[in-house]
Amino acid sequence: QVQLVESGGGLVEAGGSLRLSCAASGRIVSINQMGWYRQAPGKQRELVATVTNGGTTNYADSVKGRFTISRDNAKTAFYLQMNSLKPEDTAVYYCNVRTIYYTNYWGQGTQVTVSS
């Protein structure tokens, strides 16, 4: 089991920045990928960014150049730096880890609201 606790959401004006954090505990040695997803009202959950153990990152086209995912080497925490935020970035953001056993774990979600 892996437990995830998110922090850092909030309300920000368009053009502003926020940093989300996700603290991982439990069987973190089994984690091979960390990521962030988001779900806006009435929409499906979508991938925002992922980073593998090897450091390979992947971003949704809509956030490339604005968001940066990072992690600590001990896999106890990972982050999403969000710059140049837009109203369409408003959503509940979830952190996620995938293990070597192909199991997914999710954080509780944190609300990000970007006002125009």
Image (tube, rainbow, N blue to C red):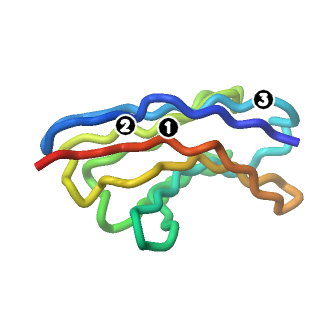
**Which secondary structure, mark 3?**
strand
Report the disc number at residue 70: 1
Q: Position of residue 55 (x, y in %)?
A: 57, 46
Labels 2 and 3: the sequence-earlier one? 3
80 in relation to 59, above or below: above
| Distance (Cα) linking label 2 and label 1 | 8 Å
Judge left or right: residue 40 versus residue 105: left
> Residue 92, image x and y in percent?
45, 51
Q: Amino acid at mark 1?
A: Ser
User: Residue at left 64%, top 50%?
Assistant: 96
Marks 2 and 1 in Cβ contact (< 8 Å): yes
Q: Is residue 94 above or below residue 23?
A: below
Give the residue at x 49% y 41%. Answer: 110
Nearest the eye: 79 or 43: 43
Quarter of image, res 78? top right
Frontmost residue, 2 versus 69: 2
**Residue type indicated by callout 2:** Gln
Which mark is first along the chain, 1 or 2? 1
In what element is the residue under mark 2? strand
Which structural element holds mark 1?
strand
Residue under circle 3?
25
How much space separates mark 3 and mark 1, taking CA atoms? Answer: 17 Å
Residue plotted at (29% across, 55% down) = 89
Q: Earlier in the sequence, mark 3 or mark 1?
A: 3
Question: Is 91 rendered above or below residue 78?
Answer: below
Give the residue pinned by disc 2.
81
